[in-house]
Structures are given as structure tokens and as C-alpha cells.
Amino acid sequence: MLLQTYRDERHSRHFDLVGHNWSIDLVTITASGILVAEFACAEQARALERPGRFSRRVEP
């Protein structure tokens, strides 16, 4: 696996990870990682909001 850079017709620089028979854009990897992290945080927040199966409410 190696890191390859190139410029498109608008002279923007792109970074790709290139393997034997594949390549993937680093922007795609970064965006996917951010989405997965946000989903994990949202799931954790949702799990902390609802009471657990074994928790009891104590009335004053």
C-alpha cells in the first residue's frame, strides 16, 4: 500500500491510498471515519438516556 498524490484539471491536490488492485481516496476514508465516530457517540448518548433493564426508580 502506498500514498499517491495527483492534481486534477482544477489543480486541486488529491491523496489516494493505492494497493495491488485497488485505490481509495483519503477524503472518503476521513469522511467515513467521522460518520462512524458520530454514530458511535449518538448511540452511546442514547444508551445513557434510557434506564437500564435492572435499574429501579426510587420514589421519594
Image: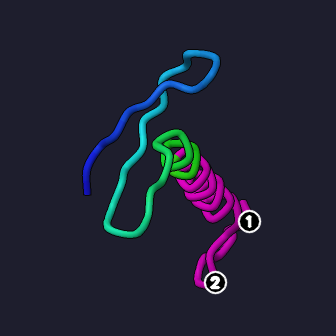
* Mark 1 lies on residue: 59
Q: Secondary structure at mark 2?
A: loop
* Mark 2 lies on residue: 53
Q: Give the crowd class for mark 1: few <14, some 14-19, many >=20 residues within 10 Å.
A: few
Q: What percent of the width, then of the height, locates residue 15?
A: 42, 36
**With 14 as the anchor, is 50 left or right in this view?**
right
What amino acid is found at the position of numbered circle 2 in the picture? Arg
Q: How many marks?
A: 2
Residue drawn at the location 72% of the way across and 60% of the way down: 60
Q: Does 36 appear in magenta?
A: yes
Q: Secondary structure at mark 1?
A: loop
Residue drawn at the location 63% of the way across and 65% of the way down: 47
Residue drawn at the location 44% of the way across and 30% of the way down: 6
Quadrant of the rendered image containing residue 44:
bottom right
Q: Is residue 33 above or below residue 46?
A: above
Q: Which label sits in the foreground, 1 or 2?
A: 2
Q: Does 26 appear in magenta?
A: no
What amino acid is found at the position of numbered circle 1 in the picture? Glu
Q: Is residue 31 above or below residue 8?
A: below
Q: Residue furthest bottom?
A: 54
